[in-house]
């Protein structure tokens, strides 16, 4: 079984029944990851696997700390012996260090899981922040607003996402610029 097949099967087993909307979101994030193939090269499969797995830490079967990036990454490393790069992307997806700080877990996350390459961190963030909870396409601004509305502005998630907004917009711009560059270089003269 290849990396992506394994990732889809594992994510489905953990999310589809207890959290069908989270599963739909994860499928949408993975679809966005596939669309980034032109800028990912040899890392396309890696990013798609991380994308479909990024929210498994919400699964009641594996949630322990209540902080899904940490719970998901720990499960992938300890129980699944997953590719370390996938583990790091799950651990640090979508500005997780900022949310970890809100939860008093920044040092724990940072010491336990090193960051993956910045362009891949940007790509996963972009995929997550351009996908609705139901798995459809959206803009980063709409996604940020949806998160604040769903959780409330004064909750841990609401505070974190508002702090992370500038980095989310910057990462999305970096990804979109890379996509535009590839698109422009593929245009006939």
Image (cartoon, rainbow, N blue to C red):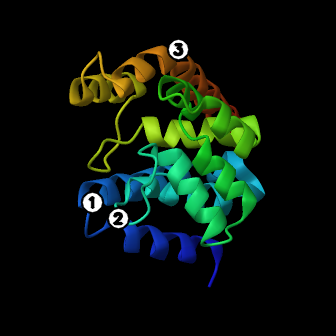
Instruction: Answer whether residue 174 is visible to the viewer in this image.
Output: yes
The Cα atoms of the two marked residues, 2 and 1, are separated by 5 Å
Secondary structure of residue under mark 3: helix
Residue 96 position (above or below residue 186): above
Q: Which secondary structure lies at badge 2?
A: helix
The residue located at (77%, 41%) in the rendering is 117
Label 2 with label 1: CB-CB less than 8 Å = yes
Expressed as whole percent of the image width and height from the top left, the position of residue 181 reads 69, 32
Frontmost of labels 3 and 1 is 1
Q: Position of residue 44 (x, y in %)?
A: 66, 57
Residue under label 3: 166
> Which residue lies under the disc numbered 2?
15
* Quadrant of residue 11 within the rendered picture: bottom left
Q: Residues within 10 Å of mark 3 (few under 14, many from 20)?
A: few
Q: Nearer the viewer, residue 81 or 182?
A: 81
Q: Which mark is residue 93?
A: none
184 left or right of 16? Answer: right
Asked whether, in this view, residue 143 is left or right of residue 8, the answer is: left
């Amino acid at each position: 079984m290849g990396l992506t097949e394994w990732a889809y099967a594992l994510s489905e087993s953990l999310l589809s029944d207890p959290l069908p909307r989270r599963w739909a979101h994860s499928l949408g994030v993975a679809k966005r990851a596939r669309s980034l193939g032109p800028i990912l090269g040899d890392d396309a499969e890696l990013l798609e696997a991380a994308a479909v797995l990024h929210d498994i830490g919400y699964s009641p079967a594996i949630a322990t700390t209540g902080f899904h990036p940490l719970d998901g990454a720990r499960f992938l490393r300890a129980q699944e012996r997953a590719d370390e790069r996938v583990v790091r992307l799950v651990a640090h997806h979508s500005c997780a260090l900022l949310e970890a700080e809100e939860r008093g877990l920044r040092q724990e996350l940072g010491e336990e899981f090193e960051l993956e390459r910045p362009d891949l961190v940007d790509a996963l963030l972009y995929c997550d922040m351009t996908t609705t909870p139901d798995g459809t396409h959206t803009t980063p601004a709409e996604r940020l607003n949806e998160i604040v509305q769903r959780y409330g502005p004064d909750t841990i998630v609401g505070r974190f996402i508002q702090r992370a907004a500038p980095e989310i917009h910057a990462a999305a711009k970096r990804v979109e610029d890379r996509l535009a560059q590839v698109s422009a270089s593929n245009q006939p003269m």
